[in-house]
Image: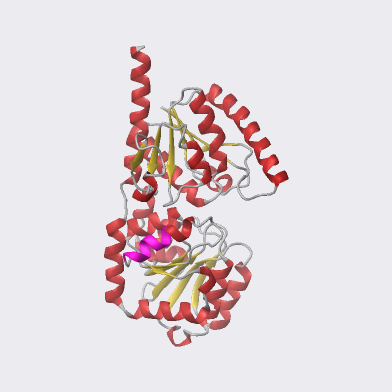
């Protein structure tokens, strides 16, 4: 079976696609081709995973100036033209869109060419690209019940958000060694998405000044992003806290495995991974994501699976207080673990793969009966 998985720009749109690819290859020996943007995270991660990738032009349209919108529309038309050539040459059995504007061209063109199509919606409130594509796609794999009603009811299926199988498989012992961390210390894993998050970095650096009495009890694993790498690393060195700082952490399964507590943004993929693992977390929604991260975070906070801090309210002293409370209250962390796992969908990749395979079977059976 030949599969095109289109989407990306951020980890939230990329990693569910990789999880689906892994499941389809395990079940069906599928040939998978990724389609993304040269500027997106996929250009770095997909080749490292050993998958083929093709690049298409794409830019966002919503909330931009007239000239920026005109440029984005031109790129969409160019993407449609290139998508037609790509689909004609690869002859996929199905095209899957994982979100982001780069998914629009391949999914729309596949629909026009009568190739089965599936889109994956990771957020409580669907993004603009998926809202548009939902009119054309054969099926929608939704993460949250709240988003199902945003699509035609005969197309929408509640599957959860796929996570990579490796996320749940890392072993603690080797992971501590990989990062040079001490198994005896309480470990806080801090990350702000694939590019880091300056507000989280700054708050954490300030928080260290309010936690000096804990230096011998805790350690940090911190994905800082390229911009803040030197300043974050220097802050830990000066404060005397044990920490492993990296601009980007490719070994996310190992990072999660050593984490006693996570501080992160609330992207859909991050929350899917946290809930599948049942990790206690302090989540800080990215304020410029069209409200997606706020809705995702509020859902988790309401059930007590995470502590929510708004980005505009994030400060070093307040963050230190929350870190201290959770570190010192094991009973609270256990409660958060249980509530987090109660909404996790570790089996989501299987559900989405079965949905994709059913679309292919229906199309093949229809063609055979024609």
Q: How many marks overall?
A: 0
**Left or right: 342 with respect to 293?**
left
Q: Is residue 311 above or below residue 134?
A: below
Quarter of the rendering containing residue 154 = top left
Of the pair 172 and 365, the residue shown nearer to us: 365
The x, y position of residue 253, in whole percent, is 41, 56
Q: Which residues are magenta?
A: 296-303
Magenta portion: prevailing SS class: helix
Tell me if residue 161 is in the magenta stretch. no
Residue that lies at the very extreme toward the top in this rendered image: 370
Of the pair 331 and 268, the residue shown nearer to us: 268
The x, y position of residue 148, in whole percent, is 37, 44
The x, y position of residue 57, in whole percent, is 64, 38
Tell me if residue 301 is in the magenta stretch. yes
Residue positioned 30% across, 65% down in the render: 337
Residue 178 seen in this snapshot: yes
**Left or right: 112 with respect to 307?**
right
Q: Quadrant of the N terminus?
A: top left
Residue that lies at the very extreme toward the bottom in this rendered image: 213
Q: Is residue 99 above or below residue 190?
A: above
Of the pair 64 and 111, the residue shown nearer to us: 64
The x, y position of residue 70, in whole percent, is 69, 40
Residue positioned 57% across, 74% down in the render: 202
Residue 173 seen in this snapshot: no
Residue positioned 37% across, 72% down in the render: 183
Q: Quadrant of the C terminus?
A: top left
Q: Is residue 143 above or below residue 368?
A: below
Residue that lies at the very extreme toward the right in this rendered image: 67
Of the pair 279 and 121, the residue shown nearer to us: 121
């Amino acid at each position: 079976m030949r599969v095109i998985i289109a989407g990306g720009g951020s980890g939230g749109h990329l990693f569910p696609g990789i999880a689906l690819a892994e499941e389809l290859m395990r079940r069906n020996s599928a040939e998978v081709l990724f389609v993304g943007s040269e500027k997106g995270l996929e250009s770095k991660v997909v080749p490292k995973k050993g998958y083929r990738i093709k690049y298409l032009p794409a830019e966002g349209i919503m909330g931009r100036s007239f000239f920026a919108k005109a440029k984005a529309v031109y790129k969409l038309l160019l993407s449609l033209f290139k998508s037609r050539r790509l689909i004609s040459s690869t002859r996929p059995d199905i095209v899957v869109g994982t979100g982001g504007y780069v998914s629009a061209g391949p999914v729309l063109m596949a629909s026009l060419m009568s190739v089965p199509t599936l889109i994956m919606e990771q957020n409580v409130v669907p993004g603009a690209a998926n809202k548009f594509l939902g009119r054309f796609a054969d099926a929608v794999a939704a993460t949250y019940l709240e988003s199902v009603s945003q699509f035609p009811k005969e197309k929408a299926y509640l599957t959860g958000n796929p996570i990579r199988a490796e996320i749940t498989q890392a072993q603690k012992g080797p992971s501590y060694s990989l990062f040079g961390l001490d198994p005896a210390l309480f470990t806080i894993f801090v990350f702000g998405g694939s590019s880091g998050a300056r507000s989280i970095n700054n708050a954490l650096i300030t928080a260290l000044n309010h936690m000096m009495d804990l230096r011998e009890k805790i350690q940090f694993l911190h994905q800082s992003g390229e911009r803040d790498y030197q300043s974050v690393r220097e802050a830990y060195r000066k404060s005397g806290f044990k920490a492993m700082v990296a601009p980007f952490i490719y070994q996310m399964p190992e990072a999660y495995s050593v984490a006693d507590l996570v501080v992160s943004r609330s992207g859909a993929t991050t929350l899917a991974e946290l809930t599948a693992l049942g990790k206690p977390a302090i989540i800080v929604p990215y304020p410029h994501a069209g409200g997606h991260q706020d809705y995702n975070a509020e859902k988790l906070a309401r059930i007590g699976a995470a502590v929510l801090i708004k980005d505009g309210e994030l400060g070093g002293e307040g963050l230190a207080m929350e870190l201290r409370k959770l570190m010192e209250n094991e009973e609270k962390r256990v409660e958060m673990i249980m509530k987090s796992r109660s909404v996790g969908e570790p089996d989501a990749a299987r559900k989405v793969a079965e949905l994709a395979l059913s679309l292919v079977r229906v199309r093949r059976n229809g063609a055979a009966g024609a």
